[in-house]
Image: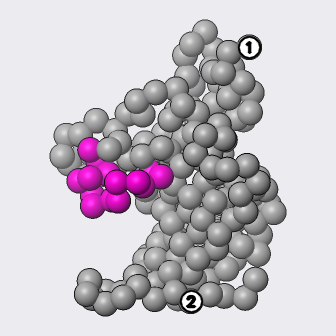
């Protein structure tokens, strides 16, 4: 069985690989949309089968996450998903961003830091309703929740990695230090 078929079986509900054609879910398509790529005329297509498989895995996870966050705030939606390296650079993303591997999403609902922390807390309380073990890192930013997803192919994350829940507030002043607030487990 080829690796492509194994990934398709793992991700089954989200994407199908039939005769070499990749059929994507609505969330998968949403994770590919990029306003910056459209504005700048940049290609935001995943470059290879591994990235597409990771993105399909992230799409399945994102569907569960958004559903849980909509219980708290019906406005919750994905604001960023996959970023090709040129798109990531154009938006000021870090060179090691997991958005480039198809393993990160940003979610918002017009929140401020208090709303983002509330969303992160709600998500942590309901983490078992997501596919267990899929969240690698959660960071509460000033206006959105950044989530990194475990690599389903096992190449980017060591086995048995446990979620790291960070409530991080990025200071508005670029010269100020980043502040961390740890919430009760």
Q: Is residue 178 left or right of residue 128?
A: left
Residue at the spot x=60%, y=65% of the render? 137
* Pointer 2 residue: 181
> Does residue 37 appear anywhere in the picture?
yes
Q: Earlier in the sequence, mark 2 or mark 1?
A: 1
Dot 2: element: loop
Dot 1: element: loop
Percent of width and height locating residue 148 = 56, 58
Which image quarter: residue 94? bottom left
Q: Are marks 2 and 1 in contact (CB under 8 Å)?
A: no
185 versus 26 height, above or below:
below
Which image quarter: residue 2? top right
> Does residue 74 appear anywhere in the picture?
no
Q: Which portion, as a residue range, is magenta?
A: 86-99
- The residue furthest top is 19
Q: Residues within 10 Å of mark 1 (few under 14, many from 20)?
A: few
Which image quarter: residue 33? top left
Instruction: Assess whether residue 96 is covered by the magenta stretch.
Output: yes
């Amino acid at each position: 069985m080829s690796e492509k078929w194994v990934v398709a079986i793992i991700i089954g509900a989200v994407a199908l690989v039939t005769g070499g054609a990749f059929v994507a879910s609505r969330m998968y398509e949403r994770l590919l949309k990029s306003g910056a790529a459209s504005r700048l005329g940049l290609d935001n297509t995943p470059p290879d089968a591994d990235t597409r498989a990771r993105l399909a895995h992230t799409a399945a996870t994102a569907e569960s996450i958004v559903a849980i966050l909509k219980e708290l705030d019906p406005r919750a939606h994905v604001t960023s998903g996959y970023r090709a390296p040129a798109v990531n650079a154009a938006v000021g993303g870090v060179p090691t961003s997991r958005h480039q591997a198809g393993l990160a999403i940003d979610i918002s609902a017009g929140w401020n830091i208090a709303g983002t922390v509330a969303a992160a807390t709600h998500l942590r309380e309901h983490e078992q309703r997501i596919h267990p073990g899929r969240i690698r890192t959660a960071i509460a930013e000033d206006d959105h929740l950044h989530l990194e997803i475990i690599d389903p192919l096992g190449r980017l994350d060591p086995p048995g990695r446990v979620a790291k829940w960070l409530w991080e507030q990025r200071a508005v002043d670029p010269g100020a230090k980043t502040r961390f607030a740890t919430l009760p487990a």
